[in-house]
């Protein structure tokens, strides 16, 4: 019996969340006496051996018609087929946009129960911790079905090195074009930027930044720290920044190692999206701003005086 | 054009979250319930599409009678009719199975959900419905347009978005940006009272997943303040004390 993991990649580059999912699967497999099979869909040849390093005992690289571009229908089909062939009882998928698109379809095909938003390994009776109430709480949820699908939240499980020499097997699965009802017309990604959902450090600005023209400082600090940029809801509502950067209850939920909030008051809906960050740093000119209650480090000061200091310091540290 | 909008009823976004019965149940005391914000967007988009395509919009909720004020609100916003499947919404698969049964009986052209419900945050219903009904599913869409009988949608992907074309019938989950939610007007509120709200019984289903208990995040240890005149110290601390940068 095995655990299969959807090893998500972007034109051959595996996502960090895939390594997290593999590590998670291997830790679970060790406890249950199972093995881990990574499933790679579409061409990613050059990097397949990385998967053994992070916990795969075996890698199945699947190629065939209609597998070069992601589609929920084709990819869920492949995952379910491989799960059958590998006699898999557990499927681990990252809680990413694509992961969430296929995991429920895979669950139905396998007759499995499914839990998303998972942030811990299961206990012996397959209870896992998951996010709930927009990160204002956590729930313990138990899966009672024989087959199980778990969607692991990125940045919630640390990547380990196993250095397994994974067996790599190539298989062909052709998906009929008639079985795919969506057609990808165009993919646009901000190039050279770290996607917010994958970032380990995030620098975020709120209405206290006064206007879009002042974001140069936020971007400069972010690029010096290797961080992604984010913003509060009013900032994206006013079109100072694009909606993809909006974090919070109605935006993206993130859990980076470091979240630096500048000129953000810390409304409950904002906190919902960022409160599980490991370390929260708040810069606000108002000592009474609610965000300080949720912070690890705080600076009461004017963003326009503090940011240049941080930028200077980051340059110094980078040298 | 027949459109089905799946709607969950959730605690207002400002609610303080607490639990009772040894942390096994959500404490609803003093909590106000609202239409899940993403479902309001799904409903508004459904109405826009229905209006320009001579269509109808049905709202469905899997829930108990206490959901009815929110369902009436959806009718006041403009839905033509509503269905309530009378049962406690358990896990996502259970809810999706209830909705799929109704959907099969009615042959909707388009089914819209929210990207997730802000209480249990599953975000699974859209994909589950797609597979249960054997139709395509598009997750987390910021644009949905009907063009020549096909859907053109934008969906969020990590660090960007993808434009897709999709055949009908299909199921799509709504992300903010999709539209501005409509608010009910007086005429809507008056007419909502007489619009049909059909109550159907649930079908029994395997309960694969169950909530065991809840827990609140640990409170922060307390904030360490850094002098604004020496702000750079923040980065020293992150590097030397926390080893995170
Ligand atoms: C249903 C609903 C959902 C919502 N969802 C979200 C969500 O997902 N995400 C979200 O962010 N919000 C959300 N909100 C909005 C939320 O309630 C707040 O209004 C919002 O987070 C405030 O954004 P802000 O902190 O940038 O602005 P403000 O509240 O205006 O705060 C600006 C802060 O900047 C400080 N400041 C001003 N000038 C300076 C300066 N020169 N230097 C340093 N600090 C300065 C001020 O002291 C203040 O604390 C939601 C609201 C509702 C009703
Ligand atoms: N009890 C319910 N009744 C009807 N629709 C629901 C219910 N729960 C969730 N949904 C729909 O599924 C979406 C995603 O919910 P969830 O999977 O719970 O995060 C919601 O935005 C609703 O559109």
Image (cartoon, rainbow, N blue to C red):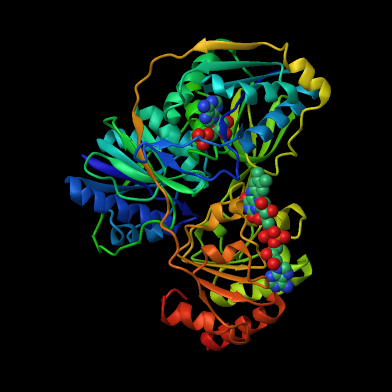
Q: Is residue A173 visible?
A: no
Residue under the point 71% across and 18% down:
B1
Instruction: Say left or right for A19 vs A308.
Output: left
Q: Position of residue B5 (x, y in %)?
A: 63, 25
Q: Nearer the viewer, residue A189 or B45?
A: B45
Q: Nearer the viewer, residue B38 or A36?
A: B38
Locate ligand 2 by image quadrant: top right
Instruction: Say left or right for A225 vs A83.
Output: right
Q: Position of residue A24 (x, y in %)?
A: 31, 53
Q: Nearer the viewer, residue B192 or A159?
A: B192
- Is residue B152 placed above or below A45 in the rendered structure? above
* Quarter the N terminus of chain A occupies: top left
- Is residue A302 placed above or below A19 in the rendered structure? below
The image quarter containing residue A53 is bottom left
The image quarter containing residue A146 is top left
Q: Position of residue A130 (x, y in %)?
A: 40, 45
Residue under the point 73% across and 36% down:
B181
Instruction: Say left or right for B204 vs B134.
Output: left
Q: Is residue A282 visible?
A: yes
Residue under the point 75% across and 60% down:
A240
Q: Position of residue B74 (x, y in %)?
A: 68, 25
Residue under the point 43% across and 58% down:
A155
Total tally of numbered discs in the picture: 0
Q: In the image as oriented, which residue stretches furthest toward the left?
A: A33
Q: Nearer the viewer, residue A295 or B167?
A: A295
């Amino acid at each position: 019996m095995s655990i299969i993991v959807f090893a998500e990649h972007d034109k051959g580059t595996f996502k960090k969340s895939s390594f997290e999912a593999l590590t998670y699967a291997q830790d679970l497999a060790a406890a249950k006496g199972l093995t881990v099979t990574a499933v790679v869909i579409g061409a990613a040849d050059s990097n397949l051996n990385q998967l053994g390093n992070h916990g795969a005992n075996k890698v199945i690289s699947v190629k065939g018609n209609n597998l070069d571009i992601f589609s929920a229908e084709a990819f869920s089909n492949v995952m379910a087929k491989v799960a059958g062939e590998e006699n898999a009882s557990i499927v681990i998928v990252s809680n990413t946009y694509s992961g969430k698109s296929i995991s429920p379809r895979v669950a139905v095909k396998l007759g499995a129960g499914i839990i998303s938003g998972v942030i811990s390994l299961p206990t012996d009776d397959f209870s896992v911790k998951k996010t709930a109430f927009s990160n204002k709480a956590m729930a313990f949820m138990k899966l009672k079905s024989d087959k199980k699908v778990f969607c692991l939240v990125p940045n919630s499980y640390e990547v380990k090195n196993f250095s397994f020499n994974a067996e790599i097997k190539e298989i062909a699965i052709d998906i009929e074009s008639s079985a795919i009802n969506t057609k990808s017309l165009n993919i646009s990604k901000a190039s050279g930027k770290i996607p917010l959902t994958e970032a380990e450090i995030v620098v975020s600005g709120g209405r206290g930044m006064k206007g879009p023209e002042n974001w140069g400082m936020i971007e400069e600090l972010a690029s010096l720290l290797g961080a992604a940029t984010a913003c509060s809801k009013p900032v994206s509502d006013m079109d100072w920044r694009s909606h993809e950067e909006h974090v919070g209850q109605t935006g993206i939920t993130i859990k980076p190692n470091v979240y630096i909030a500048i000129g953000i008051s810390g409304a409950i809906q904002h906190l919902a999206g960022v409160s599980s960050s490991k370390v929260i740093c708040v810069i606000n000119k108002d000592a009474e701003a609610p965000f300080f209650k949720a912070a690890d480090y705080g600076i009461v000061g004017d963003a326009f005086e503090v940011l240049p200091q941080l930028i200077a310091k980051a340059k110094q540290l980078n040298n | 054009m027949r459109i089905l909008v799946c709607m969950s009823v959730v605690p207002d976004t400002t609610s303080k979250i607490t639990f009772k019965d040894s942390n096994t149940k959500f404490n609803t005391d003093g909590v106000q319930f609202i239409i899940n914000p993403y479902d309001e967007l799904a409903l508004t988009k459904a109405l826009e599409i229905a209006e320009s395509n001579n269509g109808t919009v049905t709202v469905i909720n899997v829930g108990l009678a206490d959901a009815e004020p929110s369902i009436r609100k959806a009718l006041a916003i403009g839905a033509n009719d509503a269905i309530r499947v009378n049962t406690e919404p358990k896990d996502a698969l259970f809810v999706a199975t209830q909705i799929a049964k109704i959907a099969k009986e009615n042959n909707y052209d388009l089914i819209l959900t929210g990207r997730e419900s802000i209480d249990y945050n599953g975000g699974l219903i859209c994909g589950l419905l797609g597979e249960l009904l054997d139709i395509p599913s598009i997750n987390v869409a910021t644009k949905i347009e009907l063009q020549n009988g096909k859907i053109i949608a934008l969906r969020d992907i990590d660090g960007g978005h993808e434009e897709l074309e999709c055949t009908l019938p299909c199921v799509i989950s709504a992300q903010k940006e999709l539209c501005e939610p409509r608010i009910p007007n007086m005429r809507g509120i008056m007419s909502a009272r007489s619009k049909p709200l059909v109550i159907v019984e649930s079908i029994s289903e395997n309960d694969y997943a169950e909530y065991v208990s809840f827990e609140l995040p640990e409170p922060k240890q307390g904030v360490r303040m850094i002098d604004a005149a020496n702000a750079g110290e923040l980065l020293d601390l992150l590097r030397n004390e926390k080893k995170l940068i």
